Image (spheres, helix red, strand yellow):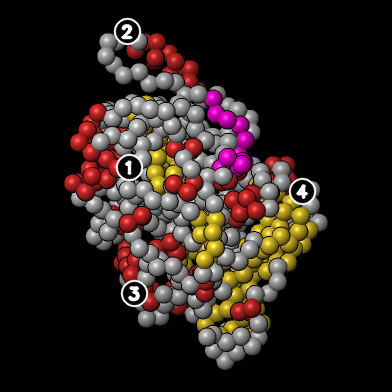
Amino acid sequence: MCRGGRRWLAILVPGYFNFSCLRFARTWSGRRGPMAETLSTGADAASGLTAPAQQNGDAGGEVRDEWPPGCPEPAGPGVELAPGDGKQTTGNQEQAPAAALGSSKRKKRRGTTGERVVPPPKKRRAGVSFGDEHFAETSYYFEGGLRKVRPYYFDFRTYCKGRWVGHSLMHVFSTEFRAHPLAYYEAAVRAGRLRLNEEPVQDLSVVLKDNDFLRNTVHRHEPPVTAEPVRLLAENEDMVVVDKPSSIPVHPCGRFRHNTVIFILGKEHQLKELHPLHRLDRLTSGVLMFAKTAAVSERIHEQVRDRQLEKEYVCRVEGEFPAEDVTCKEPILVVSYKVGVCRVDARGKPCETVFQRLSYNGQSSVVRCRPLTGRTHQIRVHLQFLGHPILNDPIYNSVAWGPSRGRGGHIPKTDEELLRDLVAEHQAKQSLDVLNLCEGDLSSGLTASTAPSSELGQDRLEDLAASAPKMDGVAEAAPQDLDTMTLASGNAAETDVENQEIDPLCPECRLVRQDPSPKDLVMFLHALCYKGPGFEYFSPMPTWAQDDWQDD
């Protein structure tokens, strides 16, 4: 990857963390302001946890880093890579400085017989919006109260990271890309799924060089989300405001791409080139605002920095919340950006939330929340500390925190033990998506868990490679002739959608996952109101916040 690995845009395979998602989100919103997400779910490093690009826990309101750990998202439109390109743009094309250097190096290398030549980076395409070609990658269908995405082929792309230079592809796959066994990548090579500088990789022993551009065609599956529609609350020449259902991420992240608010608005409402002004956690519902232009996005972010934006949330918590208003000023520390877990800690960032009880039904309370700062999971962590966690919070109301479930900041285990227990709990429930994790993360050093169930033996993968559809010009080969594949015309993007749903090399195609119930996809936290200079937007009170509501 160009210059110490700072200029790569996406990832090569699912289950690997990267910083590109954070850069993408920031450029998407038109700037690198304080509303940009912290790193948790999409800025990932396969070999361990990565440091945030933003101060510990900073976020816009009860927002969560919507880049799920372990399953990062490739570059979107406008930040898609041209061969050799290593940076993103926000509208103004910027020639990568390595281009000139690469050209110079290339001239020097031409005289070296037999040495592999790496093309210099090319200009990036301007713009940051998703377009019709992205929306057409696949389609939705609805089943059992869920919105589902038909599986589809997708290219994950990356530039060679600095630490990969001088190492073979085999070494990189075996040490960093551990979501699948090495035999999977060997089969992917035989199936023509892996390309280096847009040329099919013939041997994983090839040694990587600076500016090398890798592309891996994968069969992509997305988790289901609620079938509730994304309702428009307001639209004018400057902004679009929607009522986001619980379980739907704001923008592409981790395993989610089409099952996101950005894609649903583009595909179903023809609303494109939107700039998210803030990001609700995937399980949080309510008011979500988008700017239609970068200028409006910049103006709103200025208001955020000047503390002119006010937010109100409503939630249902365990027990009888105090009748008087409660202000919590406990500092919050991010325990893990990869898993997306925080806790109260003196070393954390200062924050403040004001709580007001609205009703109590004898078992649980409805509470209005006003976050005066914007740390990651601020409302949820403060409620846990107060001993009244959100009734169905899958993270902060978990037995993994110990008998007191984190009340008063009492957690009788180390951070490592806490993370291990949280992951084990959700792995048993087949709900790792709640933690923005993939099964591949469990074999990449996060926990001591055993290798994922999707791993296959070498012999089986060789058989599957023979029958797998060949991508980007590599024709199918007979099983007995895997090493002598011939080139033919064709492109994965042109594959008919109906023929994409089953892929013989795809581990997900062989897994049987139980669908969540729509009820399981709802957390009782709702963004009720956002207001600032010249605007005020409300969403309806959810049914679970009614005074007489009772849990089933």
Coordinates of residue 337 in the picture (x, y in percent): 43, 55
Residues drawn in magenta:
123-134
Q: CA distance from mark 1 to mark 4?
A: 47 Å
Q: Amino acid at mark 3?
A: Pro
Task: State if disc 2 and disc 1 touch (CB < 8 Å).
Answer: no
Residue placed furthest toward the bottom = 362
Residue at image point 78% right, 58% down: 535
Q: Earlier in the sequence, mark 2 or mark 4?
A: 2
Coordinates of residue 489 in the picture (x, y in percent): 42, 28
Residue at image point 42% right, 20% down: 119
Residue bearing mark 3: 412
Task: State if disc 4 and disc 2 touch (CB < 8 Å).
Answer: no
Residue bearing mark 4: 238
Residue bearing mark 2: 111
Q: Secondary structure at mark 3?
A: loop
Regarding residue 387, the answer to whether it shows in the image is yes
